[in-house]
Amino acid sequence: MVAGSVNVDGRQNRRLVVVPPSPIWRDGERLVFDRKFYDGMLEYVRFWPGPVTCILTSSAGPGPAFGSVTLEPKEAPFEVVLVASMESIDATHLAAGDVVLASGDTASQFHLTELCRARGIPCVYTIEYIPETRYQIAELSTRNPVVRARRKLYVWNTERARRRAFRGAAGLQCNGLPAFEEYAAQPSRLLYFDTRVRATDVVLQDALRERLRRLETQPALRLAFSGRLIAMKGADHLLGVARALRARNCPFELTIYGTGDLDQALRREVAEQGLSEVVHLPGAVDFYSRLLPEIREKTDLFVCLHRQSDPSCTYLETLSCGVPIVGYDNRAFAGLLRRADVGWLANMNDVNGIADVIARLSAERRELALKSETARTFAAAHDFETTFKSRIEHLQALG
């Protein structure tokens, strides 16, 4: 058995087949993995008590934007099965599998339910997005009303096919409360919260208390945002919050980590609005060597203005730093707050409401400190390793 693996019923050497939503890129004969996905595959290898296969579809598009791992296929610690970009996964690809974990967010994988049923093996889907989120993305993706209507019709048709596939599946692993609640009729659901933060990377209690001691006396609240600088993530509202705080004479510093379509527009606006002394744009930075340490050590409050209800890993990763969150009332964040008192909500698109919360917390820092402690406690119970162990146990119980 693989060291550290879990085994609920003594069965070993059953093969897990993982079919992810993300593609694989090529560098000649070498494979280029998205770093986050590759780290997740290592956890399947670590905890699954048997061989692991990953079926990957080749992509000709641009490579991973936030870190990658490049290696020869034979160097991967799991079996790699490559599928051409226009090729459909068929029964031959699943021939050696005993349990299949597929992506319920990817329409091209819905037929795996029937393939697995024909072979007499369980098919388990993961799901992140709910229909509401898909419609929100369609709404924000274009200004052309005809194109928008077509995209929404595609969402509607695809959702019908998704639910048919789920009805025949053995189980469902739901990333975040919106998906867990949306698909409540499905059998054998598991709720989990996506994160890349391992137990060893959760902020230490002593380090958090030292930061909170400084919070009592420092003049300015240190705010942060990280992620893609696009409208769906609310990046276009960040400087509105900064202006509203300045109008309220609330001392602050805001660091905006990441890159995206709005990067240059944000930089121009910072200069034009005279915000360069309090708003900083370091761009995309390495997650482990810079982003996590700076959020842990130099941030008091995270500003998360996501318009859609997807279960972003940003939530748990921020909480692991002992940093609470103020954000818009989307279903993912609101659902998280029903589980743990780790932040504050404002109405969707209410920039002034966000600024009001921040200004109040600047004057009432004890409340901010209490939720910082709660944030750390909740994230520590949902670290990367713990999350994958629970997912493996769920798969074993179904397989």
Image: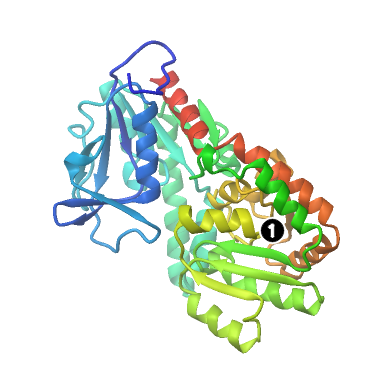
Q: Is residue 161 left or right of residue 319?
A: left
Q: Residues within 10 Å of mark 1 (few under 14, many from 20)?
A: many
Q: Is residue 38 left or right of residue 232?
A: left
* Percent position of residue 85, x then y: 22, 53
User: Is 13 in front, or is 201?
Assistant: 201
User: Is 331 in front, or is 148?
Assistant: 331
Please, is residue 332 above or below residue 232 in the view? above
* Percent position of residue 369, x then y: 77, 50
* Percent position of residue 392, x then y: 43, 27
Identify the image quadrant of the N terminus. Answer: top left
Q: Residue at x 37, y 50 (%)?
A: 35
Name the residue that disc number 1 marks: 301
Q: How is the image coloured?
A: rainbow
Q: Is residue 342 visible?
A: no
Q: Residue at x 48, y 34 (%)?
A: 385
Number of on-image labels: 1
Name the kind of residue labelled 1 in the image.
Leu
Looking at the rendered structure, the secondary structure element under dot 1 is strand
* Percent position of residue 249, x then y: 81, 76
The answer to which quarter of the image holds residue 50 is top left
Please, is residue 248 above or below residue 66 in the view? below
Q: Is residue 235 visible?
A: yes
Q: Residue at x 44, y 34 (%)?
A: 166
Please, is residue 187 above or below residue 111 in the view? above
Q: Which residue is situated farthest in the right direction here?
A: 363
Q: Residue at x 37, y 56 (%)?
A: 67
Q: Which residue is situated farthest in the bottom direction here?
A: 272
Please, is residue 4 above or below residue 358 in the view? above
User: Is 132 in front, or is 197?
Assistant: 197
Identify the image quadrant of the C terminus. Answer: top left
